Amino acid sequence: MRVTRELSRGVVYDTVDLMPSDPTCAHAPRAGAIAVRMGAMERRNIFAGPYLDRAAHMRQDPAWFETALADPESRVVAVWQSRNLVTEGDSARAVLLELSSVEPLLATSEGLILLGRFNERYCFACELEAIDPPQLAVDASFEDLRLLASRLPAEEAGLLAYARAMITWRRRHRFCGNCGAPTVASRAGHTLVCSNASCRIEQFPRIDPAIIVLVSDGERALLGRQASWAPGRYSTIAGFVEPGESLEDAVAREVLEETGILTDRIDYHSSQPWPFPASLMLGFTAIAASTEVRRRDDELEDARWFTRGELAEGVVVLPPRQSISFSLIEHWFDGAAAGKLRDIQGHEPWPRARR
Ligand SMILES: [Zn+2]
């Protein structure tokens, strides 16, 4: 994958050459390039970015799927008990297995989900279902992606997150929610169809939108902490979007419920796929229209205002640098001449992920 960048009228465009021609495959996607409009390059969060060509237009072509399965260059991202296969040294690397190495572990190829074209190879995800770690002929181990993210190349972190999300969705939708019959995969694993002929409801990969917001009164940032977190850890306010709400509605409601603060001027910042298990974090900034913190629910143990000086002094432990929460705090902190937050804070790892 080749990325070139140009600046046009103040907007950064990454031109990503995603689809080199593959003369060995008649069904390969056409060669070409797409332009991805990015508001600002530095707002791309980990797990995001055009790290692969999803080849979505080919999912409905069974012949193409079979061609990709038969291609000896095709690779598999294996997931076992929500963990990804990696090698670990000074840095971590994703392990992409040959299809032949997982075929004995899979009952049928129906378990394979097409992720797309990554580094000029077709790439699938599959779950290896076993109580103990599967024995593979590679020097690698299944690890928690949340703990690895900062040490993986960004495009591999994105690929593993995508695989983890698809596998989780697949596992949690084995039966039809309408009639209870088993579901069957179609469209290269991106649709699950009810096997009951009188139902036939289709299910698609699910993402749960959640807002996350840095509220400021200009001089201070509003941060909160949950009782289960390590002592001293604080983060931005976050919560799931509910049916019947816009994103802005959810931002205003969550901040009010968790802190009692009224918000004004809510602006979009960036987003981050968060496959633990199925969220998309939608990041915002907001200006406070009131200042008295008064929690209305028990979601947070504490919420309070912090100055840039307090954050610089390390009076709280901030979220890890790879999180959108850190990006939002950094965006606010670096907006004043108090130094760069990245030079001061953000080394704490994420806690171990739950399934
Ligand atoms: Zn059904």
Image: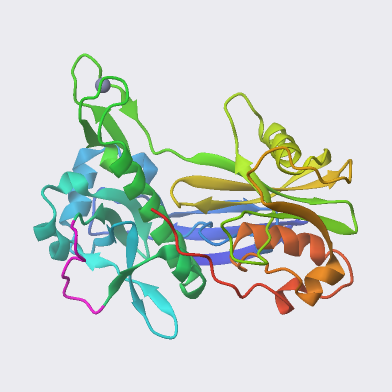
Residue name at image x 45 percent, y 52 percent:
276
Q: Which of the 4 quarters of the picture holds residue 52?
A: bottom left
Quarter the N terminus occupies: bottom left
The picture places residue 335, in percent across and down from the top left corner, at 84, 63
- Compared across the picture, whether 55 is left or right of 44 comes to left
Is residue 213 shown left or right of residue 21?
A: right
Q: What residue is at 79 percent from the left and 40 percent from the top?
A: 260
- Residue 33 lies in the magenta-colored region: no
- Residue 158 appearing in the image: yes
Q: Position of residue 125 (x, y in %)?
A: 29, 54
Foreground pick, 101 / 340:
340
User: Ligand 1 is in which quadrant of the figure?
Assistant: top left
Say which quarter of the image contains residue 159: bottom left
Q: From the viewer's side, name the closer residue of 43 and 196.
A: 196
Q: Which residues are magenta?
A: 130-139
- The answer, for residue 9, to whether it is visible in the render is no
**Magenta run includes residue 138:** yes
At x 39%, y 50%, the residue is 165
Residue nearer the viewer, 98 or 129? 129
Query: Considering only vertical position in the picture, is 305 above or below 203?
Result: below
Identified at 50% across, 56% down, the residue is 50
The picture places residue 229, in percent across and down from the top left corner, at: 58, 60
Dominant secondary structure (helix, strand or loop) of the stretch shown in magenta: loop
Q: Residue furthest top?
A: 198
Position above or below: 183 against 199: below
